Image (cartoon, rainbow, N blue to C red):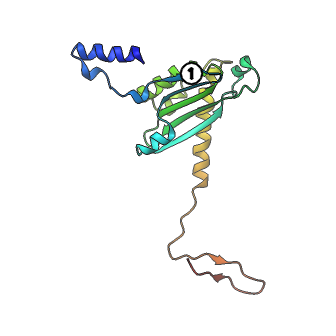
Amino acid sequence: MGKYQAHVLAEILDGHPDAVSGDDTTAPRVVFTDPQVATAGLTLHAALDQGLDAHAYDVPSSATAGAAFHGTGTPGTARIVVDEQQGVIVGATFTGTEVAEWLHAATIAIVSQTPVELLWQAVPAFPTRSEIWLKLLERREAGLAGAARQIPAERPATTRPVQPARRGQEPVATAQR
């Protein structure tokens, strides 16, 4: 972060304040514990607070073939937060063994506002842990497909719930509360 802030200061002192955004929300952050916690951009809560049409997509960080290099079933999670209206990633959080290495790719996607659909073209090598990006994109695609199937048809305002009919009787509308 200090290197970024030094760059911002240099741009301002050189008379180019428009060359920097001054938006620290995209800055990568890592807690070097075991397991590591790495994040860039907004959390789901922060994105929703800003009024974004944000959705989170989670996968286990052990979901790739490359994860086997760190041990089968190594615990951890990967999450992207997507502004679905704009179609861009606005945040990413990773927990697990050596996940800080994923942060630069996340930061580039967030800062550049690369459309999520374009990220499918950034094919990771196999078998590497970078395949986590494919798993996250697949999870988003499955989530969007599932959401489209689960959208309930709206009832007209005048429709009342119907009490099941007993054998030989007509259904009875119940009073609304």
- Residue furthest toward the left? 15
Residue 1, given in percent of the width and then of the height, sits at 42, 18
Percent across and percent down for residue 140 are 58, 38
For the residue carrying disc 1, how many other residues have a C-alpha within 10 Å: few (<14), some (14-19), or many (20+)?
some
* Residue 175 picture quarter: bottom right
| Residue 47 point in image, percent of width and height | 45, 40
76 relative position to 91: left or right: right
Under circle 1, the secondary element is: helix
Relative horizontal placement of residue 169, taking residue 107 as reference (left or right): right
Q: Which residue in the protein does label 1 denote?
A: 102
Judging depth in this view, the residue of 28 and 173 nearest the camera is 28
Q: Is residue 73 above or below residue 69?
A: below
| Residue 127 in view (yes/no) | yes
Vertical relation: 4 (above or below) 172: above
Q: Nearer the viewer, residue 119 or 32?
A: 32
Q: Quadrant of residue 123?
A: top right
Q: Residue at x 28, y 15 (%)?
A: 11
Residue extending furthest toward the front: 33
Question: What residue sits 46% from the left and 32% below the top?
Answer: 115
Q: Quadrant of residue 102?
A: top right
Q: Amino acid at mark 1?
A: Trp
Q: State whether residue 52 appears in this view.
A: no
Front one among 30 and 70: 30
Residue that appears at 69% across and 18% down: 127
The correct choice, above or below, for 58 with respect to 168 in the image is above
Is 14 positioned to the left or the right of 146 in the image?
A: left
